[in-house]
Image: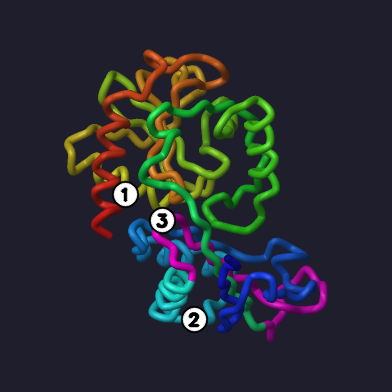
Amino acid sequence: MTRTVYVNGAYMPEDQAKISIFDRAFLFADGVYEVTAVVGGKMVDFDPHIARLHRSLDELEMACPLGDDALREMHEELIGRNGLDEGVVYMQITRGVADRDFTYPEDAEPTVIGFTQVKPLIDSPQARSGVTVVTIPDIRWRRRDIKSTALLAQAMGKQAAKTHDAYEAWMVEDGYVTEGTSSSAFIVTGGDTIVTRQLSNDILPGVTRRAILKLSADAGIAVEERLFTVDEAKAASEAFLTSASSFVLPIVRIDGQQIGDGTPGPVVAKLREVYLKEAAGA
């Protein structure tokens, strides 16, 4: 079945969707995006995703051409038209179309696109077995807090992970883990304390990260937001990653070294359980 996608106010079959070669996202990666999970045909954490979208747009001095209600309606329409029960909705807003020039055009109309992807989120084999991670140098730009479409460094990291038969790559700067190529990074120390890097321009403010920190506090699990090294991660009792498209996944090996007993641990299992309950009630 051909998917229905959204382009600038119109819904159409994916093979009919077209964007100008002069769109600034194509020429300069001058755009932002969000990925929202869908469970049971309903969106998960949509409002925090929209809040982060506005923050990214503001940081790039880019206008949002649609109001929040219209953005929600677009997502729900795509879910309905494509019969999406479980998966994600991808949305991208660019500065628009203009002749190639580095400075921002004054009269360009923003481009808005959206599409769905089917993906198993609840019954994930990776959640049962755990995943492996490799570490790589963080070669990205200095405004990683903006959810920009400039993802070449992350794509290179994903390829490095694939080359090493790993699920994800953790990026490292000055000896400290920043985050995964498309996920937030966590370790568990002392058996029951969650550690994750504090927010700054160095990492993306993950929506699922935000939810997990709140759920941890509600469950009485201690949290430390601070830097941690690769060596500390390898010595941790547990490690895990979070993202909108994978929720919470346990990590059982980093650079080939076993984490804990090499199986998903109890803290991660508990967090995934409580998050899935939240998602199912979205």
Q: CA distance from mark 1 to mark 2?
A: 26 Å
Q: Tell me the SS state at disc 2.
A: loop
Does residue 45 appear anywhere in the picture? no
Q: On screen, 89 above or below 105?
A: above
Q: CA distance from mark 1 to mark 3?
A: 19 Å
Residue ID at (62%, 74%): 13
In the rendered view, does 187 fall on the left or right side of 23?
left
Instruction: State the residue at coordinates (69%, 29%).
Output: 163
Which numbered circle lies on residue 38?
A: none
Q: Amino acid at mark 3?
A: Glu
Q: Secondary structure at mark 3?
A: strand
Decide which of tag 1 and tag 3 comes sooner along the chain. 3
Q: Which tag, 1 or 2, sits closer to the chain's start?
A: 2
Crowding at dot 3, Cα within 10 Å, few <14 / some 14-19 / many 20+, comes out as many
Residue beneath disc 2: 66
Which quadrant would the N terminus be assigned to in this image? bottom right
| Whole-percent x, y for residue 152 in the image | 70, 48
**View extreme (bottom): residue:** 107
Q: Residue 173: give x, y in percent of width and height.
A: 59, 32
Quadrant of the image for the C terminus?
bottom left
- Residue 211 marker: 1
Residue range in magenta is 82-108
Q: Amino acid at mark 2?
A: Leu
